[in-house]
Amino acid sequence: MPVACARHILVKTKEEAEKLKQRIANGEDFGKLAKKYSQCKSGKRGGDLGEFRPGQMVKAFDNVVFKKKVLQVHGPVKTQFGFHLIETIYRQ
């Protein structure tokens, strides 16, 4: 079964997620923005969620982590928690 490591930034609105994604695209540090803006407790760790397997996260989140390009910021992805920017660090 595959395993992945990812980090994310969770915010309340799509607009907020899009603004943060633009800031990352402009060279700002994902981890620093996660610490400052993420509503998830993983924000304290720069958004780091550690390793997990398919099915451990909500479906929309899993779809990004296990199907989209690694080391690229994806989103905003809407879940019942809010809007995520997701970066898969590795997948094996």
Image (spheres, helix red, strand yellow):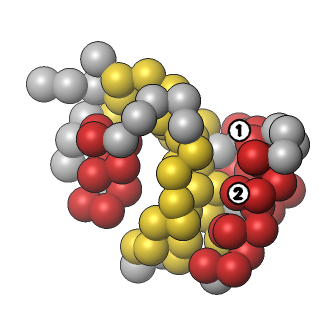
Image point 61% across, 63% down: which residue? 10
For numbered disc 2, what is the local secondary structure? helix
Where is residue 22? Give x, y as percent.
Answer: 76, 58
Horizontal side of 83 relative to 5 (left or right) equals right
Q: CA distance from mark 1 to mark 2?
A: 18 Å
For badge 1, the amino acid type reads: Arg
Viewer can see residue 32:
no
Label 2 neighbour load within 10 Å: few <14, some 14-19, many 20+ = many
Q: Which quadrant is the C terminus positioned in?
A: top left
Image point 61% across, 79% down: which residue? 14
| Residue bearing the label numbered 1 | 45
Chain-order first, disc 1 or disc 2: 2
| Residue bearing the label numbered 2 | 21
Vertical relation: 11 (above or below) 65: below
Image point 52% across, 60% down: which residue? 75
Vertical relation: 67 (above or below) 39: above
Q: Which quadrant is the N terminus positioned in?
A: top left
For numbered disc 1, what is the local secondary structure? helix
Viewer-side residue, 27 vs 59:
27
Where is residue 9? Give x, y as percent.
Answer: 64, 56
Horizontal side of 63 relative to 46 (left or right) equals left
Viewer can see residue 62:
yes
Label 1 neighbour load within 10 Å: few <14, some 14-19, many 20+ = some
Do the numbered discs 1 and 2 sit on residues whose CB atoms are within 8 Å? no
> Farthest left residue?
1
